[in-house]
Amino acid sequence: MRILNSHQGSTIVACVIAFLIALLIAFFTAKQVKSTSTVEFCNSCHEMNPFYKTWAAGKHGIDSMGAVRARCVDCHLPHDSLANYLKVKTQAGLHDMKAHAMKKKTPWLEIWKNRGPYVHEAYESGCKECHKKLVAPGIPVKAFTAHKAYIVGQTKRTCIDCHHEVGHGDLVTEFREIAQKEQ
């Protein structure tokens, strides 16, 4: 029987401790990712209230009948890989925390009206995660044709190009009301 020398024993103990620490960090990280993925967490900053309000009344919000209820992270984070999901979630979270701490005012009305690029766009992979069957029996011919062209790559249009109010309904009206209150 071979006996481990003290150097080998120390290496094994160090590896076990490192593994346990890594396991603890992974558990803590997973718990934080889950707790920061709720709609309630996203709406905990007052800046998100217009988005919460229009989402709640929208097709995928809490007030909708029959549609799938989507969380913020279902649409506003990519679902192409876990690494990209975590990277974008971290970047977006840090951006939002910085903007909140600095009391940064974002000109949402102008951004939305001009459909310019903004930080938290909806991701196609989020749409595809829930809407796997775009061409299903019984859908109108116009919808069948549009989705068929999308599926076979005959169009560069995205889900949001056609369904731009699906997540939040009429954000422009909400932003106008906020702008009027601020004047």
Image (tube, helix red, strand yellow):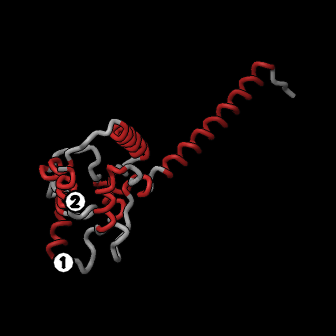
- The amino acid type found where label 1 is placed reads Pro
- In terms of depth relative to the viewer, which is nearer, 59 or 141? 59
Q: Position of residue 132 (x, y in %)?
A: 33, 65
| Marks 1 and 2, the one that precedes in the sequence | 1
- The amino acid type found where label 2 is placed reads Glu
Is residue 183 depicted above or below 95 in this figure? below
Residue visible at 39% across and 42% down in the picture:
93
Q: Residue furthest right?
A: 1
Q: Left or right: where does residue 29 sit relative to residue 49? A: right
Q: Position of residue 141 (x, y in %)?
A: 15, 76
Residue 105 makes an appearance in the image: yes
Is residue 26 depicted above or below 160 in this figure? above
Residue visible at 41% across and 52% down in the picture:
44
Residue visible at 69% across and 32% down in the picture:
17
Is residue 131 depicted above or below 40 in this figure? below
Instruction: Name which quarter of the figure residue 49 lies in.
Output: bottom left
Q: Quadrant of the N terminus?
A: top right
Q: Nearer the viewer, mark 1 or mark 2?
A: 2
Between the residue at mark 1 and the residue at mark 2, the CA separation in whole angstroms equals: 31 Å
Q: Position of residue 27 (x, y in %)?
A: 59, 45
Q: Residue furthest bottom?
A: 138
Determine whether label 1 and label 2 are within 8 Å by CB: no
Is residue 50 depicted above or below 138 in this figure? above
Residue visible at 17% across and 55% down in the picture:
180
Residue 153 makes an appearance in the image: no
Structural crowding at the residue carrying mark 2, measured as other residues with C-alpha within 10 Å and reported as few (<14), some (14–19) or many (≥20): some
- In terms of depth relative to the viewer, which is nearer, 114 or 123? 114
Question: Which residue matches tag 1?
Answer: 140
Question: Which residue matches tag 2?
Answer: 174
